Image: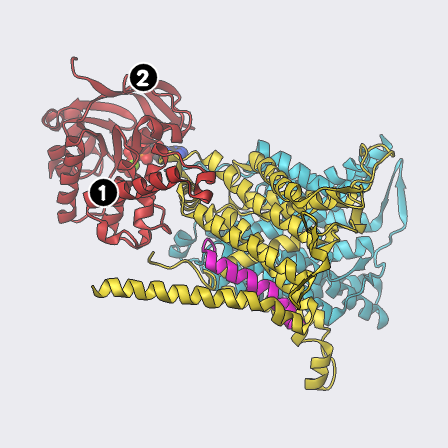
Amino acid sequence: MDVLLQQIVNGLVVGSVYALVALGYTMVYGILQLINFAHGEIVMIGGLTSLFAAKGLLAMGAPPLLALLVAILAAMIACAVIGVLIERIAYRPLRNAPRLAPLITAIGVSILLQQLAILVFGRNYFSFPELISKAPIVFGHITVTLNEIVILLTSFGLMAALLWLVHNTKVGTAMRATAENQKVAGLMGIDINKIIAITFAIGSGLGAIAGVMVASNYGQAHYYMGFMLGLKAFTAAVMGGIGNLWGAMVGGLILGLVENVGLIFVRGDYKDIFAFVVLVLVLIFRPQGLIGERVAERA
Amino acid sequence: MAGMTGMLQTRRNQMIALAVLGVLLFILPFAAGALGQAWVRILNMTLLYVMLALGLNVVVGVAGLLDLGYVAFYAVGAYTWSLLASAHFDLHYPFWILLPLGAFLAALAGLLLGTPVLKLRGDYLAIVTLGFGEIVRILMNNFDKVGLPWSDESYNVTNGPRGITGIDGLNFFGFKISKGLDLFGLQITSLQLYYFVFLAFAILSIIGVSRLQHSRIGRAWQALREDEIAAKAMGINTRNVKLAAFAFGALTGGLAGGLFASMQGFVSPESFGLLESIMILAMVVLGGMGHIPGVILGAVLLSAMPEVIRYAADENMQQKIFGLVLIAPEVLRNLIFSLAMILIMLFKPAGLWPSPEKK
Amino acid sequence: MMTDMLFTAENVTKRFGGVTALDNVSMEIPRASIFGLIGPNGAGKTTFFNTLTGLYQVDEGKFTFDGKPLNVKAPHEVAEVGIARTFQNIRLFGEMSVLENVMVGRHVRTKAGAFGAIFQTPSTRREEAAITQRAHELLDYIGLSKRAGDKSRTLAYGEQRRLEIARALATDPKMIALDEPAAGMNATETIALRELIERIARDGTTVMLIEHDMRLVMKVCHHLAVLDYGRKIAGGTPSEVQRDPAVIKAYLGGAHTEVTK
Ligand SMILES: Nc1ncnc2c1ncn2[C@@H]1O[C@H](COP(=O)(O)OP(=O)(O)OP(=O)(O)O)[C@@H](O)[C@H]1O
Ligand SMILES: [Mg+2]
């Protein structure tokens, strides 16, 4: 029972990070019907940028909290810029191309970003400074760290903010209109290209923060960290119903929970299988994902 | 009359082109051998990739089902061979059992994957097949201690990440390819012999796949790709047709897997990761989806290009040109490779050699 | 009723959430006749096609086809029974050639498998030759032989509509259901279409026609059914329907005045 509670807590922490990354996939998919394969690499760049920014600031004598905030900001700016650039250069010219063409450029961009990260940062595993205490805090039978609590709260805060933005602001309305029907949105005077760029910027910004979270939680970052994380987050997005914000969040949390709770029953070697087994099961019974609504076939 | 001679003319030109190609394909392994046996191995891998790309092309290019886990079928073929013809279990079955068996098991795996995902569309299918590929790889990694996941007693089936070594080579009724051949003074190395075997399989695959594509089944696949609802209205049982595409694609992959294991003498899960699936998909898309010559071109380019870049970009070369090593060759290779992928798609979104507008 | 009915619908109802797209609709179609299904936009005409071809399941009611109950479980079985259709928003196989589109239509009436294709068995080759020949005949029939090798998406609008008809005819249907075949056609094309439809019926295939072009409908159809808001409000010969006050009201009430053209 205690183990179960502990794993649920761990699962929520990991799941909230998956959810943040999944949001990036789902936002882009919602608007462009494109699997932005490079999004995992954005998260990686967020992690590495923040790591080096934080280390530099600490070395200059900045207090940890300031170092953290500046590092996050740096990561967000770097990722947003890269995200927007990728869209402009690699995806926009292919908007009317055969469906698989942008997927292949996305894969190309993903490999390219990894190699650039090696060039800029190097191949090593770099350790992330402990900016928020990771000393265990014991609540009854469960143990958490302040770092984990901050991750959880920040994630939920960001998700709430995103939902608010999408549903209550002009930009959000324009985003929804664009996702619904690009042509019509264009006719209504919405600047489609601008909205798509904003979508990439927001998604990448969220990915950057997720990268900081992962790096700080595991205490390290490296050029390959985005791969599995991106894969799982995308899995989460699809499981929830791709294109649907709530779906990405629910999918991310469920995936985190299943992985961690599953560890109680099955050897850790199989952990990475869970994600996919659960995904397959969910999609067999709900081919449109958990929350994504079924789009009726019209003839 | 003019049309008739014109046709004969093109027919003759085709024959000449075919003859030239045949001679080139014959000389190729010896030319490569002169540079080093490593280049012959690259040629052989290229032939396997041609088979893999053709197999995946049936699924993705012809039937329009986005499969991101294709390498799993390659793995099934490779492991079938490796487990039943190696020192691992001390089993040594002959190729005429193992190649068909590997292909059959791969096709079975294709059906196994295909059945639950029939209802899924587009990108949902992509992620589930990706998951399937990962599941297969993780199982290979962990089946060195097979038992019930919650118990500790276990058996070593796949030898885990260490992989399987000491795999038997191809062995034609007593003639061992791995020994090479002395043909009236012409020394043919083992790898060069593999080349000719693989070439034969690649050619058979090309013939098989193109015959299928231009058959009743092939047209049903294309119809499915173009418009599933209209295909149904035309009386096509889309379920069966999809399964056939998965099974046939998988079969080709399984065959290539067996050949791969026989040549390498060593297999490990590392060879069957997601990146490998993606690479094969890139061959299909960059070459020209659904168009066999394009797919072959894509396979040749993407499997040979990294090796050539590796050669061209190696440290000596950089030293010569710049006087110092600027970028690690491996990184440079991947940089150029990924840039090429992006640029080709940006400038030729339908692939380098798409199917012609007029048939 | 002594005439031989090929197709009957009895009390068919289909709902989408709150919308009742088909409300207790019944009709019967005599063999080898041309039957028109008309009504204002959103009346439920396409939905009727979709239910009878198995794309949607009916909520209530049943169909009979060729003397047997039509169990529409899967769309591909409907084609096998002998009902073929075209689509309001043309659904050709765009990247396939014009000829191949028609060849796909032969799928239900042929049986070669993967084995035969790979090894080019004599029976497969014979069947393939027959498919090709029949496809060419059908292209002749609709006058598209010259474009046989072009990708179907390169055809003009009217040609695409005719190609869809040829593709449907390739399944050897007993009844062909055409969803607004004249939409987007110019006057000359429409006349050619009218001749084509009449020829199809003469050659023994029953035609079910959804069409907004009233001039075409009134000239070509033997019988009509009129739908409005999912309900059948009238039925009979064109002249009966034209005089029916309910029909005039439905059309004049809505945006459509074509009936008076
Ligand atoms: N798949 C669906 N899901 C929900 N509602 C649908 C669906 N298909 C049709 N409808 C609704 O059913 C009603 C009838 O539509 P239908 O397409 O059958 O009309 P129609 O008579 O063919 O019109 P038109 O002449 O414009 O083609 C409409 O209100 C339509 O919105
Ligand atoms: Mg309609």
Location of mark 1 (residue): C137
Which region is colored magenta? B289-310
Q: Earlier in the sequence, mark 2 or mark 1?
A: 2
- In the rendered view of the protein, which quadrant contains the C terminus of chain A? top left
Same subunit: marks 2 and 1: yes
Please give the count of numbered marks on the rendered protein. Answer: 2
Q: Is residue B309 magenta?
A: yes
Is A288 in front, or is C15?
A288
Is A293 in front, or is A278?
A278
Which numbered tag is attached to residue C68? 2
| 3D distance between C-alphas at marks 2 and 1 | 31 Å
Amino acid on which disc 1 is placed: Glu
Please name the color used to draw chain A: cyan
Rendering quadrant holding ligand 2: top left
Quarter of the figure with residue B316: bottom right
* Residue A86 left/right relative to B167: left
